[in-house]
Amino acid sequence: MAIIANRMIPSKTNRRPQNFTLLTFHFAAIILSVNAHIHSAEFTFMYEETKKAADRQNDSDMAADTLTPRQREIVDAAIRLISEHSIQELTIKKLSARIGVTEAALYRHFPSKLDILAAILGMFRQNAVEVHTRLRDMPDDPLQQIEFLFMSHFRTFAAKPYLADVVFSEEIFQNDSRLADTVYSIMNLNLEILQSLLEKGRLHGQVREDMRVQELTIIIVGSLRMLVTRWRLERFRSDLELQGRAMWETLRRIITRE
């Protein structure tokens, strides 16, 4: 849910509740980095097909579950270095100094900086797959599954704040086609699952029918991005999970039109 498509959300009326007006203001300011065309389908089918597509696109990438302990240490240090400084500061020399090994030793684990970035994305993709696997094993309650999907991001970022700086900096990965393709597959994996859950929620009578699923998806993902971005700018001082929980209660009322 960290990446969504280029779209602007206009404010339709000045008589909306204050929370809704605040949300639409922020959504209008969000420029989505990759265009996605998403089709509705049953959740299990969509999960399997999207996961297969992601796997096909990323066969050449190093999967997170195949990393050695030392490689995981390097990836974690790289994420922290990007978070604390910038992608320009991520050099083999600085990274090797940070973890206390020689440059030659680091090259034995990753042939290049590009391979380190690919491993970072592989970790993000693996995390997304694990969340969606848990969704599939949950009770057949689409609204509860959407809540779990939404809140899982806040729990992840609250536990490792430095991840947010990299997850929400998609431009880091746009200069290489392999990395850009991986970003695109992660985006699709998240968005297609969310939209399929919203469609399924309609079949269960849980989700309102007077708004398009695509618009509801942007409202949900846009609110996630807005909260995390504000939290990043204040350098992680507030309780992100608490804010996410409050936001979910507002979103639930919007989704279900309570």
Image: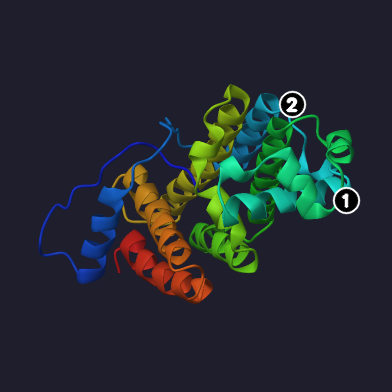
Percent position of residue 35, x then y: 40, 31
SS for tag 1? helix
SS for tag 2? loop
Percent position of residue 42, x then y: 54, 41
Q: Earlier in the sequence, mark 2 or mark 1?
A: 2
Percent position of residue 66, x then y: 85, 41
Decide which of 30, 234 is in the foreground and name it.
234
Instruction: Provide the residue designation for mark 1.
Output: 69
Give me the residue at 51% from left, 70% from top: 236
Question: What's the distance in space between the residues labelled 2 and 1, CA to CA?
Answer: 21 Å
Residues at circles 2 and 1 in contact by the CB criterion of under 8 Å: no
Percent position of residue 83, x then y: 58, 54
Residue farthest left in this picture? 14
Decide which of 104, 3 is in the foreground and name it.
104
Instruction: Provide the residue designation for mark 2.
Output: 59
Question: In terms of image quadrants, where is residue 5?
Answer: top left
Mark 2 or 1, which is nearer the eye? 1
Q: Amino acid at mark 1?
A: Pro
Give me the residue at 65% from left, 40% from top: 121
Q: Amino acid at mark 2?
A: Asp
**Number of numbered callouts drawn:** 2
